[in-house]
Amino acid sequence: MLRTELIFGLMSISAFAQTPKVAPFDPRLPANTIVREDIFAGYDGNMERLARGETNLEALLVERPQAKATLMAWKGSIALTRAVYANEAGRSAEFEQQYRKALEFFAEALRLDSKDTGVLAVTGGSYAVFADRLPDKLRAEAWAASYKAYSALWQAQAGLLEHFPLHIKGELLAGMAQSAQRTGHPAESAEFVSRIVNTMPKTPYASMAQKWMDNPETASRTKLTCMSCHEPGRLAARTSALASKDAK
């Protein structure tokens, strides 16, 4: 009996020692801020950074259950990223598995909170980044999901548009313009392209939108979204600023 208890005790100690410890995140940092930079790096093909973002995401699911809806959308984005790269590498079984997971995670995020602006932005934006890189048979449904998410986001945030910083304003208008163009809503797309040109002069968004206006035939093979969301260092800057504030 004593030996059995000792064995189980040692096993418990060993398991505890092997469990990775994740330091608590600064509560002043939003969950999106913590995970997005690594996930964006994954969009560009850095799978190591993507995995780090996933590790932080799983820790946040435990630490911040109130953010679960948005974090599930990010899980969908991670799975979609892996699906696209697996497909382009010819790993069809992995693609099918990851794409199925992406659909399930996005659906769960919407089930948890279909009006959460984080859920809508991550869902719409993820499809906007990757829909054109999916197999032909899946592109229409991916763009439809993007358009639905952006439309709901527009309804929720249109009245606040002028108060948004460049990135958020640009991505919302560009997401509407591009997803509408890809889903057969040309008049609606043209409306948002015009908004970008008229309200965001001298920005990358306006520059590309003007090209769409000047040469409409290029719209189907170019993109408006993701013009300002991949700059590295945002998390480090926020963390440094908080540390400086604490030191005062």
Image (tube, rainbow, N blue to C red):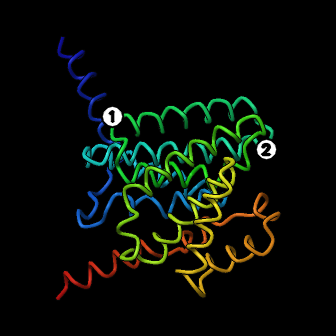
Relative image position of residue 246 (x, y in whole percent): 19, 81
Residue position for label 1: 15
Q: Quadrant of the N terminus?
A: top left
- As drawn, is 30 to the left or to the right of 44? left
Instruction: Reply above or below: 196 against 69.
Output: below
Name the residue at 30% across, 66% down.
29
- What kind of residue is marked 2? Ala
* Tag 2 secondary structure: loop
- What kind of residue is marked 1? Ala
* Tag 1 secondary structure: helix
Which one is in front, 221 or 58?
A: 221
Which one is in front, 17 or 5?
A: 17
Q: Quadrant of the C terminus?
A: bottom left
Name the residue at 78% across, 45% down.
88
Name the residue at 35% across, 69% down.
160
Relative image position of residue 174 (x, y in whole percent): 58, 65
Relative image position of residue 220 (x, y in whole percent): 77, 57
- As drawn, is 58 to the left or to the right of 139? left
Residue position for label 2: 89
| Circles 1 and 2: CB atoms closer than 8 Å | no
Q: CA distance from mark 1 to mark 2?
A: 36 Å
